[in-house]
Image: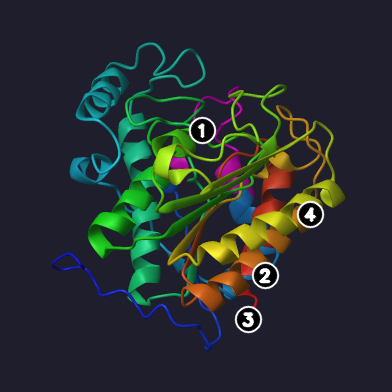
Amino acid sequence: MTAVGRPAPRSNAARRDPPTVCVFADAALGRYRFGAHHPFGPARYPAFIEALRASGLAARVMLRTSAEASEAELGLFHTQAHIARVREQCAAGVGFLDLGDTPALPGLYEAAARVVGTTLAAVDAVMSGGCTRAFVPIAGLHHARRDRAAGFCVFNDCGVAIEHLRQRYGLARIAYVDIDAHHGDGVYYAFAADPGVYIVDLHEDGRWLYPGTGAREETGVGAAVGTKLNLPLPPGADDAEFLAQWAAAERFLDAAAPQFILLQCGADSLAGDPITHLDLSAAVHGHVARRLARLADRRCAGRLVALDGGGYDPDNLGAAWCAVIEGLLAA
């Protein structure tokens, strides 16, 4: 069922027209950040914009502006207590929203709500046919739980987007793919028992990296067993090791026949990231985006939204996310 006032979703038939890609990016979105000495600092968004322009990709995509989520939209995924706590603690600008990674700062509530609103705007643009695929460069905040912040993530725009797709558009099968170096625990555990959300998560093994979750044996709970695929990689894993795992991931996704694909494409899995230990190149991100775009064309009329996720080396994130956009543009 489609909500009143929302555009009707396109057919699930295979897409045949050349793809159009929307990139949602403006200075307001870049305000989701922490201090200059924090890994999620103010240099990340400018680094992406510089790389987008230098690559020539800015002329090949449709540039769109950000939007701020309402409290009701945040509440599609998050508890009212969590939303209220974030608003009040950020207004005071005191302490941390989690155990020490995510400081409460004045203006952070609004900035975090803008990340969520922009992800929802990207989803709506794809669902309405305004573009075939979309990319959001400050998004993919996959650690936040329904009731708390965690790991630089105040609100979980990925989780809100999944609930939005189901509640506003009536979609029954949604695929969430995560190639950030960190396991997307906030998404996985929120939907671990949900058989309609198919999750593929390739990440550095939790025995060596936060949040310590995402073991291969975690395949879902109850009726959802078998709808989740966690593929941990050892520290130092390179492109060949990733791609050897990716083949199984792609078969899993194709069999799931999703109606929509969300990709969290964190760049912290590239070699040289200051807080992780994988050894991938941007070619992996381009490959994943291109293969998912083709799968989306076969299964769900091209409907695919990519969310940037982590990445704490400016050169790496520029290279990885430009490679993703190139992949999304592939016919």
First along the sequence among labels 2 and 4: 2
Badge 1: few (under 14), some or many (20 or more) residues near its Cα, within 10 Å? many
Q: Is residue 92 left or right of residue 327?
A: left
Q: Amino acid at mark 3?
A: Ala
Say which residue label 3 marks: 331
Q: Nearer the viewer, residue 103 or 231?
A: 231
Name which of mark 4 and mark 3 comes first in the sequence: 4
- Asked whether the viewer can see residue 28, the reply is no
- Quickly name the residue at label 4: 243
Give the distance between the C-alpha atoms of the residues marked 1 and 2, in whole angstroms. 35 Å
- Using a 10 Å C-alpha cutoff, classify the residue at mark 3 as few (fewer than 14 neighbours), some (14 to 19) or many (20 or more): some
Q: Position of residue 20 (x, y in %)?
A: 51, 77
Helix, strand or loop for disc 4 = helix
Instruction: Say what amino acid the circle numbered 1 marks.
Output: Asp
Q: Are marks 2 and 3 in contact (CB under 8 Å)?
A: no
Q: Residue at 49% of width from left, 69% of height from top?
A: 133
Q: Residues within 10 Å of mark 4 (few under 14, many from 20)?
A: some
For residue 185, the mark is: 1
